[in-house]
Amino acid sequence: MVDQSFRIGNVEFRNRVFVASGTFGYGDEVIDIAEVSKLGAIVTKSITARPRAGNPPRRIVETPCGMLNSIGLANMGVAKFINEKLPALRNLGTKTIISIAGSTVDEYADVVDQLESAEQDVPEGWIAGYELNVSCPNVKEGGLEFGTNPRTVEKITRLVRERTRRLLITKLTPNVTKIGDIACAAEQGGADAVSAINTFIGMAVNVHERVPRLSTVTGGLSGPAIKPIALAKVYECVQSVKIPVIGIGGITTVNDAIEFLLVGAWAVQVGTTNFVDPNAAPSIADGLAAYCEQMGIASVGELVGALSLPGDLRSR
């Protein structure tokens, strides 16, 4: 038997494979089509203080190796989430991490305050914690404006840290010069972990009509195309902070997940490929265990940071 369990902060997860925010809905929508109980955790779509309609269509464009999206954080708002979705979390069979977004720094605090007050509606331990989405490139207020500024990232993280003892993860944008600096800011603000990366800014053009293919002109690029860059960004974060890093970006196979673990990620989040196969993440979790058994590895944790570097790099 391969040990797949691990801890971040005060939370123990059954395995190191999560699903990324925005790709599994609020969690309850996929119960009948995916083996949710095989996941380490679900990260919900981002919740804001008030409902958001999101950006107008067209807001999704398929690319040769992924997709562009400009959803604009469309969601039902925290009050409706608490009333309609929070009770359903008891039926998921795995832990839930609630993604939080906001147009102002104080909005993050407001959402957390309301969620903390509603904690009695779910079984003990099923809400593992919160992921702070300070890195969405598809909204006019907040988003990249927050995620590219280390001081703001630290401020938001600290403000939420003061309001909860639950696991706190800050999600980082890759659209910066040095992502390690942003990771350090989250660590200084009290984050238990950082997740990296969110989407890259991208664009597509309709050559027949000579117009952008997204209503917002640009959107967030995700999928297999970004995996090599995501790996490099995760590696940079691992070298910059002492807290765990959760790797995200273009993971579609078990080998992709292993690459992220080898460069130092404690866990991974599977995103865009969920739209192709809702059971991709559970399959990757099974595949990690099978790989370790085949290689004679007793624990998946032995893969974390096990990358062999050239001699001149090891000595640095």
Image (cartoon, grey):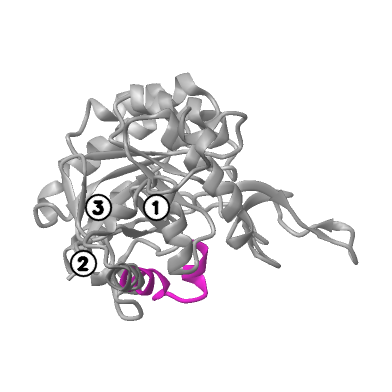
10 Å crowding of disc 1: few (<14), some (14-19), many (20+): many
Residue 59: give x, y in percent of width and height.
Answer: 64, 59
Q: Quadrant of residue 250?
A: bottom right
Please, what secondary structure does the residue beneath circle 3 have?
helix
Q: Is residue 284 above or below residue 32?
A: above
Please, what secondary structure does the residue beneath circle 1 have?
helix
Task: Work out whether mark 3 precedes mark 1 in sequence or the reverse, and give the earlier one.
Answer: 3
Q: Is residue 316 left or right of residue 224?
A: left
Task: Determine which residue is flagged by label 2.
Answer: 2
Please, what secondary structure does the residue beneath circle 2 have?
loop
Q: Disc 1 residue type?
A: Leu
Label placed on residue 261: 1
Label placed on residue 82: 3
Residue 142 in view? no
Q: Is residue 86 left or right of residue 219?
A: left
Q: Which residues are magenta?
A: 270-286
